[in-house]
Amino acid sequence: MTDAAGLWRDISRIAAQATGPVLDIDLAKVTALDGAVMSLLVEMRARLVAKGIRCGIVGAPELIRPLVHLYHGDEALHASVPHTRDSLVDRIRHATRRWTGSFRLAVTFAGEVTASVGMLVRQKGTGNWRALPGLIERAGTDGIPIVLLLNFLVGFVMGFQSAHQLKLYGANIFVADVVGISVTRELTPLMTAIIMSGRSGAAFAAELGTMKVSEEIDALRTMGFVPGPYLVLPRILALAVVAPVLTLLGDIVAVSGGVVVAVSSLGVTPRGYLAELRTAVVPSDVWTGLAKSFAFGIAIAFIGCQQGFATRGAAEGVGRGTTSTVATCLFTIVVVDTLFTVLFRVFGA
Amino acid sequence: MSPRTIIEVRDVSIGWSQAEVLVERASFDIREGEIFGILGRSGCGKTTLLRELIGLEEPLAGHISIAGIGAPSLGATRPKFGVMFQQGALFGSMTLGENIALSLERWTDLPGDAIRAIVRAKLRLVGLEAAEHQLPGTLSGGMRKRAAIARAMALEPSLLFLDEPSSGLDPVTSAELDRLITTLQRGLGLTVVLVTHELGSIFAIVDRCVVLDRVSRSIVATGVPRDLRGSADRRVQSFLNRQPEDA
């Protein structure tokens, strides 16, 4: 082992420079050999064979022969096709195939879940509704503190960023307009959805992924349940209910964050701020935000469940699904938000 | 009169794809009221074959037929057989009682107290009456497997599939589980399909078996385990006598 580094340099050089049809490794004069050196000799032989040079480990004395056998040094080797790296075109083709495969799976899953809504009416036990209160508690009640804190800070930051500009024009009171409209229409639904992606979306993916790899989903199937609707529908309903409620609470605290800035930096009274807020923010601002958050809730639950069901392998597969869920949720939230914003603008909401 | 055939497997090929076939053209019958073993070394396709027998996967070729059901398929219908998975696959968020009650609530109109009575009886059958309100995570491996058998028996199936029930258990617990399987099979007249590579279980409880071989990708023997011990086939000898083939 102590001489292995020097030996490795030597045999790498020999293997690289070797030419000709045959080159045997003769161990006739070897009196002692350890596993590490034997591993290197076996590797050298494999490299030579890969170059098309016939190579055997020969002449091993009686004492060493068991070690040669143990490391498969006496087995026949055939030249294998050298592994070449995929070209850029191949890699793009593989990536496209993977992506379209995932997309097809997601569309199929969406179809199955949508179709299963009809089963709710026809068959009892289609969804695991007993789990619904627990899901609402975990996704909703347990998430309230973080949602309130972050949305308060968002309202505060919005007020703070606009305070300087408003002061320049003596438009201090309009801080209520800036904070009120921005948080109700955009920021609170987005911030709440981002928090829900990390908490609930990832939790759903991990939970269902673990059920998948531990054969619990197979067990459900053998018991006559259709796992998709049974596990997915309660989760979608839970987030569809919880997301607008959390968003509404987030709106209230975000506006409160604006009050703090208005009072402390702009000399606006709380009464004045609220009066301006009532003028600036119309019910449709709040409703559009809640409609978005409803859609975000459904999307997050759907993505988390789909990734959970798509889990393969063991613990590492669950980790991959969870990471993928958060990334996909964030992307989808921004896309859905853009669509809603354009639609609301077109229809004047 | 010989017992009737419950499961018929004809020319079935199993595997992940046409390029990765585990077993080719397997044919055998499973008879009513027997404990039938699917045996072989790790990786030879025992569990995959079981998954195809219960309809979780489809064979690459050939056909499987279960008496009274036809080709196995799973859907939103009352299951005709019970299945115990390798790790038990109990639902971790439910107590043992709730795990067993689940399919009774889904597929019967029994009132809650009747379901609870059946659940208690099933747990008593497997010696777990005291663990009704415990979560699976708080139980030992052997207890989880017994609970999984109780859950598989909830709807009184006449056919029971068990995937490596004694794997990972100590020899005494393993023997207790074997005794439980025999007791249930004899007492209730069940047909049991057992996937295993535990020699103790094979010789103690299996009536007839098939031995799968991963190298030849085929069934290398069919019959009574004790008779197969004297088989001339080196692969069967090697497996049943616990000897590496090149030894």
Image (tube, coloured by chain):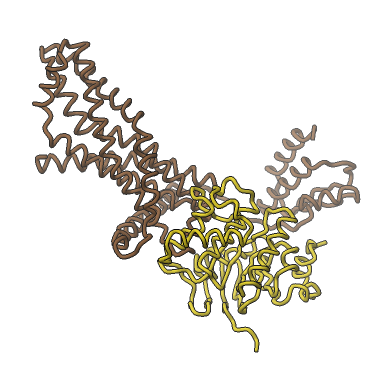
Chain colours: A brown, B yellow
Residue B41 appears in which quarter of the rendering?
Answer: bottom right
Residue A278: image location, x then y, percent: 11, 26
Q: Is residue B110 left or right of residue A21?
A: left
Q: Is residue A252 left or right of residue B28?
A: left
Q: Residue at x 76, y 57 (%)?
A: A75
Residue B221: image location, x then y, percent: 71, 75
Answer above or below: position of A263 versus A95.
above
Which quarter of the rendering shows the C terminus of chain B?
bottom right
Answer above or below: position of A157 versus A68.
above
Q: Can see residue B19? A: no
| Near-viewer residue (A236 or B160) | B160
Q: Residue at x 33, y 45 (%)?
A: A238
The residue furthest bottom is B1
| Near-viewer residue (A18 or A201) | A201
Residue B133: image location, x then y, percent: 53, 49
Q: Can see residue B93? A: yes
Q: How many marks?
A: 0
Residue A77 appears in which quarter of the rendering?
Answer: bottom right
Q: Residue at x 77, y 52 (%)?
A: A73
Which quarter of the rendering shows the N terminus of chain B?
bottom right
| Near-viewer residue (B93 or A254) | B93
Q: Residue at x 49, y 53 (%)?
A: A212
